[in-house]
Amino acid sequence: MFHVSAPLLQPPSLFIAESEDHDTNARSIVCVHGLGGTAGSTWYSEQSGKSWTSDADFLDDALKDKVRIMTYNYNADVAANMTGASIALHATDLLGLLLAVMGRGVSWPLVFVAHGFGGQIVKKALLLAQHVAAYRSVGHSMAAILFLGTPHQADDAGALLAAVRVSATLMARRGSRVADEDVREFAEAVRETNAEFQGPPSARLKLCSFWEGKTTLVSPKGEEPYETMVSVFDS
């Protein structure tokens, strides 16, 4: 297996962790990072110096050599993503890359692990797979989605906008500026995706959400620092 730290602005790509003794029928876990992350940094622990997507020590013995881990890397720069089209763009790229991998014989089903707004990409990918014939095989292969700190709110636009603002503040590169109008446009795209995503299309697809139990210190430029929860969830 290997650890990849890809440049932030490189073209979208799908990295596959392989080992010589991999079971050819291995199931696949697809990891999708969120805003401000990369396929390498998001899943990497500075404390241990290891990445759970590439280090076999993070896998239970029952899973070793029985799963294939893939990491989707895309331009997650905050300022570049504050548009209404970015979620669909990344979802389409992800579907195309997965189709290419399927052509190389990677086995199914697929289990997605999505961090933050990477969860919006996976949701949109599933929605596209339901409506676009070319992607239907990927949709049928989706077995589970694990959301890590992904906002699911669709009814409270104000709360969702606040969550997007917090994430943009935390994840933006130093020195970059994100216009409030752009943040609102992106937040509306997130809300629309959440509203359209009304749960799994069938009993086959399992969903599970995890979120932080502690507040995060946010220090907006020119404002007083404050503690807040980043993600917004329906009650």
Image (tube, helix red, strand yellow):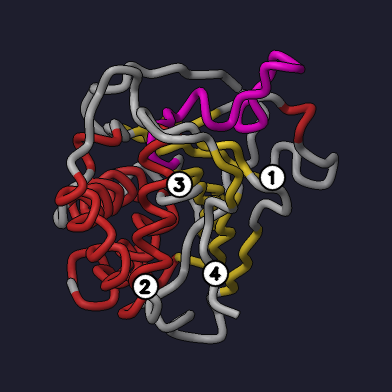
Residue 195 numbered tag: none
Label 1 near label 3: C-beta < 8 Å? no
53 up-or-down from 200: above or below: above
Q: Which of the two discs, 4 and 1, sits closer to the camera? A: 4
As displayed, is residue 185 above or below residue 172? below
Q: What residue appears at the point 18 percent right and 57 percent down from the top-left corner?
A: 185
Q: CA distance from mark 2 to mark 3?
A: 29 Å
User: Who comes first in sequence, dot 2 or dot 3?
Assistant: 3
The answer to if 192 sits in the magenta stretch is no
Determine which residue is flagged by label 2.
Answer: 194
Give the SS element for disc 1: loop
| The C terminus lies in quadrant | bottom right
Which kind of residue does numbered mark 1 sit on? Lys
CA distance for labels 4 and 1: 33 Å
Q: Which residue is mark 4?
A: 233
Query: Label 4 is placed on what type of residue?
Result: Phe
Q: Which residues are magenta?
A: 34-54
- Does the magenta segment cover residue 52? yes
In the displayed structure image, the side of residue 205 where residue 90 appears, left or right: left
Residue linked to disc 1? 66
Look at label 2 and name its amino acid.
Asn
Taking the view exactly as shown, the residue that stands out farthest to the right is 61
Proximity of marks 2 and 4: CB atoms separated by less than 8 Å? no
Disc with the residue nearer the chain's start (1 vs 2): 1
Residue toward you, 86 or 70: 86
